[in-house]
Image: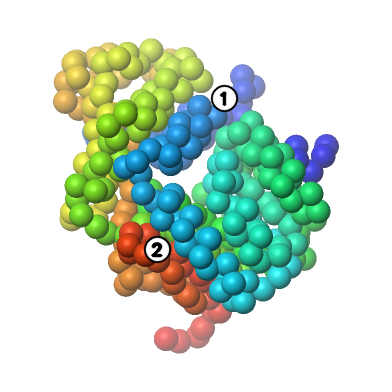
Amino acid sequence: MTQNEGIQLVERDEEGVVVAFRDDVLTGLSQRQKAIPARWLYDDAGSQLFEDITQIPEYYPTRAETEILEARGEEFAELIGAGRAVVEFGSGSSVKTPLLLKAIDPGAYVPLDIAGDFLRAAAAELSGKFPGLPVHPVEADFTKRVELPAEVADMPKLGFFPGSTIGNMVPRTAVDLLREMRATLGTEAMLLIGMDLIKDEAVLEAAYDDAAGVTAEFNLNLLRRINRELGGTIPVEQFRHEARWVDTYARIEMHAVAQADVEFEVAGESFVMQEGESIHTENSHKFDYRSGNTLLLAGHWTPVARWTDAQDRFSLILAKATVARAAP
């Protein structure tokens, strides 16, 4: 096995179905407010659609974060130091990663993603750009503690979690994830994490419901994935995409809304939805300075530095693993 083939930590049944995907879908569709965790939006097709989303005019986060990464490289290098193993959680196509790797002179790169084929293709492409850098892709659900490759066991780690993916989770789940990241990376680790900022409602809703319909396609692809991988019979054409700003929770919610009464099966189980009912597929929480720091502290990370783009739309925060204390 070459370093770019990596390792697989995703549990599948005898038919090749991802066990956690099936369990989450069946549990989520059985709830009064049907809901499926956002991480399942990212199969290979969904990952490619998300990359398409990052290029649309209304979707500002990728451009804003890239601006920070391009402008602050010297500061990253000074604060992070050379020789760390960069562990990217939910790496996708790793398009922002080269900007960080060029700045900090890492000892290795470990991309973690649940979309295996997409992961390995991206890892191979990045290896071509950094021929002297060891790359060790790991197909895994990064929401749980991950056993990193032996080759990086003794290296100090930098977790990289761009794109405000942390905002996809409710606060309790986000804190759990941050603690799992700390367990994965070790006590001497650092974390560079993206957090989208609270802004005008119209700007936010447009970013998640673009005029070209790319985000709608991304959202409804989850239903197609269920049909494809779990033997589903969901009538996808009877659902529409909807993005909602919920001010109480400072988040955009994505829903797949039934446009008529529908009945369908998934993995041998039957479900019924009435017109207007929805499947809640994603949250995207937005933060300010205080709420972002509080979330990190609850997850056992201590903020060290914070950067925003020129328009204060997006933030990157550098944090270090919190040292255990006996008292406040």
Residue 236 appears at what percent x and percent y?
33, 17
SS for dot 2: loop
Residue 44 appears at what percent x and percent y?
54, 29
Q: Quadrant of residue 323?
A: bottom right
Q: Is residue 79 above or below residue 58?
A: below
Q: CA distance from mark 2 to mark 1?
A: 41 Å
Q: Is residue 320 visible?
A: yes
Q: Which residue is mark 2?
A: 309
Q: What's the mark number on residue 259? A: none
Q: Earlier in the sequence, mark 2 or mark 1?
A: 1
Q: Which residue is mark 1?
A: 17
Amino acid carrying mark 1 in the image: Val
Residue sitting at x 29%, y 35%: 210
Residue sitting at x 51%, y 83%: 325
SS for dot 1: loop
Residue 327 appears at what percent x and percent y?
45, 87
Q: Residues within 10 Å of mark 2 (few under 14, many from 20)?
A: some
